[in-house]
Amino acid sequence: MDFPRFLFYATIVLSISVCLFATMANSLGINYGQIADNLPSPEDVVPIVKSIGATKVKLYDADPRVLKAFANTGVEFIVGLGNEYLDKMRDPAKALAWVKQNVQCHLPATKITRIFVGNEVLTFNDTSLSENLLPAMQSVHAALVSLGLDKQVTVTTTHSLAILETSYPPSAGVFREDLVDCLSGTLSFHQKTGSPFLINAYPFFAYKGNSKQVPLEFVLFQPNQGVIDPATNLHYDNMLYAQIDAVYNALATLGYKKLPVHISETGWPSKGDEDEFGATPENAKKYNGNLIKLMSKKTGTPMRPNSDLNIYVFALFNENLKPGPTSERNYGLFKPDGTPAYSLGISSTSNTVGSGNTTTAGGNNGKPQTTLTPPSSPTSSSTGYLSISSATERYELVGNVAVIVTWWLIKILV
Ligand SMILES: *[C@@H]1O[C@H](CO)[C@@H](O)[C@H](O)[C@H]1NC(C)=O
Ligand SMILES: *[C@@H]1O[C@H](CO)[C@@H](O)[C@H](O)[C@H]1NC(C)=O
């Protein structure tokens, strides 16, 4: 093969690899909170979400402006029903009206795949609120069934990690005893309707409260010796995985060993009050950057190595009207003006092909596609390609098949 030809085919191979890399990064989810008075319009948020390669967005409501702006973008949505709706949603007629008006009308242009009913309801310790949770979830699900949408849209709720009585070591993870009755009903609901269990997990909270005892490397996914769970002999080198496995264990003790667990929120603030140790842009960059790198490897936790964690990073923007400590207003990857809150190492994959303005094979409608690459990765042309071999399971398979097919194409064409 002469050299120009080689270059031409090599470009094709690289282009396909880059597309695959983009596919692998597809599992990134992002929380789009809007407790702020200075955020960009939803239309302007579409390219921001795309710039980080996020393909899943979680809203805290069902803001029609956002859902319309994201029509026909392929981005998947989880919409939320706030705690203030729980009482109302017990009523099947009201649940049906809500689903029609807030979900059905956007389908199929906007890909809403899940509704979360109530946010961290059980840890408010408000019995009347907690008692409304399951009936509200049931009415919303029944509404979806009656509209023939229950196969494409599932119903769940989100929990704080504080529903655990014990979370360490992971093998000792159990739910708070006073919540077990209420939880059992929702767990059985998840199993019957095929929806996942959603947990919000913040190693930052654990670090903030015990910064002397907890090694920063362990919470930021930095290299460290880790810890071994004495009961299972499993090795943990990051706190998030230990927290998630504590949840798996708690579910297993109630007989729900197979229930999928998704991480509906996790993140790290770039700013905090004086007593909020660790809330810095450097640490936020390490936490979120390393987390995204870990996600691209598609490995589960030590206890469930084959599970897909479906992580939603918190959050897209800093939210200036959130109450509470300074950290609460500073979880964003982006500032309200749309510029990054700190450098996360965002690089355009079209550049990684090294072919300048040439669009990639298989295309992205001719638009350059940007993917969030971990800060430590070199942005060389090899990044996308090598990632295939470090990916696991189906992505590895898809990658290999694509490379083989590409070689065949070259052989046939040359
Ligand atoms: C709820 O109750 C638990 C257990 O009694 C307690 O540890 C927790 O601090 C309470 N949370 C709130 C928000 O009151
Ligand atoms: C890419 O191509 C477009 C249209 O063909 C052109 O306007 C633009 O300047 C080019 N950009 C670079 C970086 O070459």
Image (cartoon, rainbow, N blue to C red):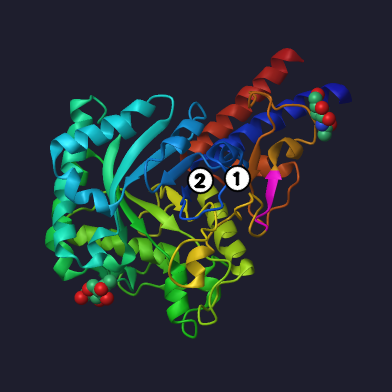
The residue identified by callout 1 is 52
Q: Is residue 152 in sight in this rendering? A: no
Disc 2 residue crowd, few under 14, some 14–19, many 20+, Cα 10 Å = many
> What percent of the width, then of the height, locates residue 44?
60, 39
Between marks 2 and 1, how big is the CA–CA gap? 9 Å
Q: Predominant secondary structure in magenta?
A: loop
Q: Nearer the viewer, mark 2 or mark 1?
A: 1
Against 164, is 159 above or below? Answer: above
Q: Which residue is mark 2?
A: 28
Q: Residue 166's spot in the image, x, y percent?
A: 27, 73
Residue 352: x %, y % from top left: 74, 40
Quarter of image, res 354: top right
176 above or below 141? below
Magenta residues, as a range? Answer: 343-347
Residue drawn where x is 43% and y is 65% of the image: 202
Q: Secondary structure at mark 2?
A: loop
**Which amino acid is tagged 2?**
Leu
